[in-house]
Image (tube, rainbow, N blue to C red):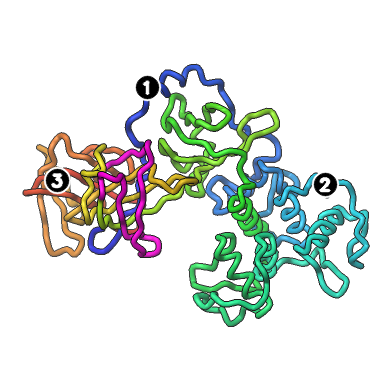
Amino acid sequence: MVGGVLVGYRRGKLVGLIALVLIMWGSVAGVGLAAQEAGLRFGDVPGWHWAGEYIYGLAARGVISGIGQGRFAPEKQVSRAEFAKMVVYAIGKGEAATGGGQTKRFSDVKPEDWFAPFVEVVQSRGIMVGSDGMFRPVDGVTRVEAAVVLARLFGGGVAAGAGIGEFADAGDIPEWARSAVVVARACGVIKGYPDGTFKPFDKVTRAEAAAMVARYMDAVGLLYDAIGTVEMADGPAGKVLVKSPVGLAALPASEVWAEGLQGGGVRRLDQVGIIFGADGSVKFCAVVTPVDGGMIAWVEAGSGRFGYVSRGDGKLKSVVLSSECSIYRQGRRCNLSDLQEGDTAYVVLDRTSGRAMVVDARRANFAGKVLAVEGSGKLRVEAMDGRELRQFSVPEGAVIYVDGGKAKLGDLNPGDKVLIWEQAGIAEYIEALRSEAGI
């Protein structure tokens, strides 16, 4: 925390690999990432699409498919028939539904319609019930209708409820959907917009529907076949070594999803969700490690735990270290006892136990902008408020990062925003952020 602003978590490489992993690398059977097989690549869903991770995860799971010609049409409105099919496959009833549609419940659904068996499943289970004797299969799905469906999947009632006052347009959410919106939002499957609105009657796109269904499946443990751990993040030929309950797999780092990006960066000890193909190959892999952090409030080295004020909700939280926890301070490996009150800590949590797998702490006492890198290890910096010019000596062993990657003094450029920990004019830790909005 510098000047009241938190610095973003580094997704850089973490040092320290066990010798066993290095030995095993050469003997790992190449379990290829089969995400490039037909049907799992959509020309209109690049690896940086906001919903790409959800779309390709569901495609690998067999929940969704494209519209033909290698396209998914992410911005097209999802129809009620399409949404019904997604829901049926999400709850594991897709194969049973393909036996043929027998429904005569709706005047606008014929037994021979492709969607009839899916409509039959969602209607018989009370998930989607239609109205006035019609299902309206080609109509779009509004956000409140989607919230009701998702709440029913979770078993939540859809009676009148409270807890939506934080939305600027909460008054527009109809009474019959209020409790459902509360349930769906509390379970993390549907969210509001950056402007604080919910937009209850906006139609859901195919990309948004994929995101909602994938979040539901993840929340109830239906999305991934296994949770693995990254044993090596920077192996030969750009491979990532993943240990899962079925063994070790060497996967191309460029194919692993992280922070919503394909090839977005993987760390050792990251936990990943894995979807296997029928032949045992990995069809989809994504980082699922929860990350939190904030200002360290206390440290109890003897009991292996510490407390911090979460940057997410501002609450004081206590976390216990896992037996494999890697701890860093100012970019160097250290012990829990080396952490100090007031340090900004970034915490990678175990998805199951909630224990800390990685703690990356740092402290800076100067924030500024690089003016010049001079010879003999000198760095001239202007304070962020422009009121002070400083020149620092940067020793050979100083820890320097640029956008999360290890760097040297010569890699810094004029204009870089930097955080510095210095003592008596000697900069021991420097972190430059070029891709962040601020520091």
- Tell me: 246 left or right of 107: left
What is the magenta segment's predominant secondary structure? strand
Q: Position of residue 23 (x, y in %)?
A: 42, 18
* Cα separation between marks 2 and 1: 48 Å
Q: What stretch is highlighted in magenta?
A: 300-328
Q: Where is residue 162 in the image (x, y as percent from the top left)?
A: 57, 77
Q: Which of marks 3 and 1 is nearer the N terminus?
A: 1
Residue named by callout 1: 19
Depth check, front residue: 299 or 193: 299
How many discs appear?
3
Count residues near mark 2 (Cα–Cα under 10 Å), then give few for <14, some for 14-19, many for 20+. Answer: few
Q: Is residue 217 above or below residue 167?
A: above
Q: Residue type at mark 3: give it.
A: Ala
Helix, strand or loop at label 3? It is: strand
Asked if one can make out residue 415 in the rendered structure from this viewpoint, the answer is: no
Give the quarter of the image for residue 327. top left
Which of the numbered marks, if any, corresponds to residue 427? 3
- Tell me: 251 left or right of 312: right
Q: In this view, does 68 lie above or below 196?
A: above
Instruction: Residue at 78% x, 48% y: name it.
Output: 94
Instruction: Residue at 61% x, 77% y: name it.
Output: 161
Depth check, front residue: 233 or 99: 99
Q: Position of residue 360 (x, y in %)?
A: 31, 45
Depth check, front residue: 121 or 241: 121
Give the quarter of the image for residue 283. top right
Q: Residue type at mark 1: give it.
A: Ala
Q: Where is residue 144 in the image (x, y as percent from the top left)?
A: 66, 71
